[in-house]
Amino acid sequence: MAGGPAANRIRKAIALVNSVADEAGDEEVTPTEIAEAIRDCLELSEVDEVPNVRRYLGEALDAVSDGMPADFVAMTLYAALGALREGGQN
Amino acid sequence: MPERHSTSVVFMFAGGSRLEDERLAGVSHFIEHLYFKGTRRRPSSKEIADAIEGVGGFINASTDKELTAYWARVPSEHTELGLDVLFDIVANSRLDPADVERERMVILEELRMYQDQPQDYVQNLFEELIWPGHPLGRDIAGTEESVSRLSRDDILEYADARYRLPNLVIGAAGSLDDDDTLALVSKGLSLREGLDGVLAALPPSPLDGPRVLIRRRETEQAHICLGARAFSYLHPDRYALDLLNTVLGEGMSSRLFLNIRERLGLAYDVHSFTQKHRDTGYLGVYIGVDPKKAVDAVNAAMAELRSLGESEVSADELARAKEFTKGRLRLELETTNGVAFWLTYQEVLLGEIKSIEEELALVDAVTAADVKRVADELLSGTMQMSVIGPFSRDSAFRLAIGA
């Protein structure tokens, strides 16, 4: 699986969210850290090259702000990653 | 089929659940259950079962949206018995008040059981979206409210109106003599002839736009059904639709299976299917998936759908799909039951019977351009999607299908 910068940043955000979902981390990951990781993704112009990627990331950010479960945030990030894949960007 | 040892007999009544209004929702299915409870000559369900099972045979029934079928498969020397039991249950059932109440409880449990089977229930929800506010969008068994409300008088009245000769087609296949079978059928017919008015099957209204319906359940997997309205079984492109469906999601060599399960590892169960009725139908995709990968899997399925409208399937892929479709039809027709049902379905629903050679020729005549044209047409319709899983928000799902 190739990895452009956007795909790599989304994977990093997913890893953070999954550590919350799986309660696997030694240190507690805060919603602020997850939101920061998603904002890092949104900064890349690459996310505008494939339809819906920015919108999925926006949904993920909203979900974090609204206190939605980590699994739900992860689902939206996987959707963004998948959209990049379908668009041939990762 | 003189080489066979069995005969299958099918009694198929035109009608089914799409003719029921909201008050009578589930009455056809209720009647089907009650017809196995006892007749004047065979007063209990045990005696009905014993008559057929006593010779090693099988008897059963099913209610569909446009028909209800009662069938028996017996060793061929007992063809007369099979016909006699079926005539008995459709013409002489007692519909005892105590049986009505007992069966009501059974059907209510059946309805609740389906709700506990998300793989099936998600398809019911999908049909609610595809045919909103229409009997086709309702569970064949009705609703808990309608089944609780149906009175014995409702049931008697409906059975009397629908179980009449003009609505009945009898099919038989197996080791039987045509003339003898016709004589037995003529002797056994005792249903009333006329129909009290014709109940029209109203067509469903056009869809407003794409919609997502989420039923929140704390399931381990997300169960998703998505698709669009497609063709009726009378539509000239129905064979192209069937081949499109085969390429897309029938079997382990289909695009959905190879890409979503084998390549991406997103889902354990992913397949596509069609439903066809007299004036409408749909193409659907089912996905059973880790909730975290739910929207990703929907996007991947949508990409497969879109690709069918973007370029023609290869000659090899189309040839494989044709062989798959023709082979499945031939396998279905290996049993006497399969042949009896196939003939009877055609007569009830299409009003004519095609030979297997004619049917296979229509499959062979489909071109790659036909499949692409059909895919284009379906994708221009509005997508609908039902989801069962631990989701409290539908925004990402709506984004995936443009809703």
Image (cartoon, coloured by chain):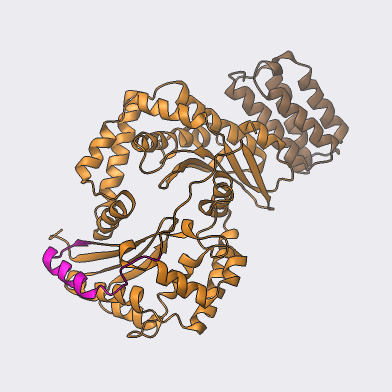
Q: Colour of chain A?
A: brown
Any part of residue A18 in sight: no
Q: How many marks?
A: 0
Find residue A11 and report its horizontal and vertical position in percent.
70, 27
- Does residue B318 lie above or below B285 as drawn? above
Residue at 23% over, 76% down: B81
Q: Is residue B102 magenta?
A: no
Residue B198 appears left or right of B192: right
In this picture, which residue range is highlighted in magenta?
B172-196
Q: Quadrant of residue B316?
A: top left
Residue furthest front as drawn: B197
Q: Position of residue A1 (x, y in %)?
A: 59, 23
**Which quadrant: the C terminus of chain B?**
top right
Q: Does the image show residue B12?
A: yes
Residue B39 horizontal/vertical position (percent): 37, 82
Answer with left or right where residue A34 lies relative to residue B83.
right
Horizontal side of residue B183 vs B66, given as left or right: left
Residue B98 vertical placement versus B210 (above, below): below
Asked if residue B360 is positioned above or below residue B103 in the image, the reply reads above
**Residue B1 pos. (x, y %):** 15, 58
Q: Which chain is orange?
A: B
- Residue closer to the observer: B274 or B184: B184
Q: Tell me which corner region of the image, top left, top right, bottom left or bottom right, holds residue B69.
A: bottom left
Q: Does the magenta run of residues contain B188?
A: yes
Q: Which of the pair B200/A4 is nearer the observer?
A: B200
> What residue is at 45 percent from the left and 29 percent from the top?
B375
Seen at 23% across and 46% down, the residue is B354
Report the residue at 54% width, 48% height from top. Answer: B127
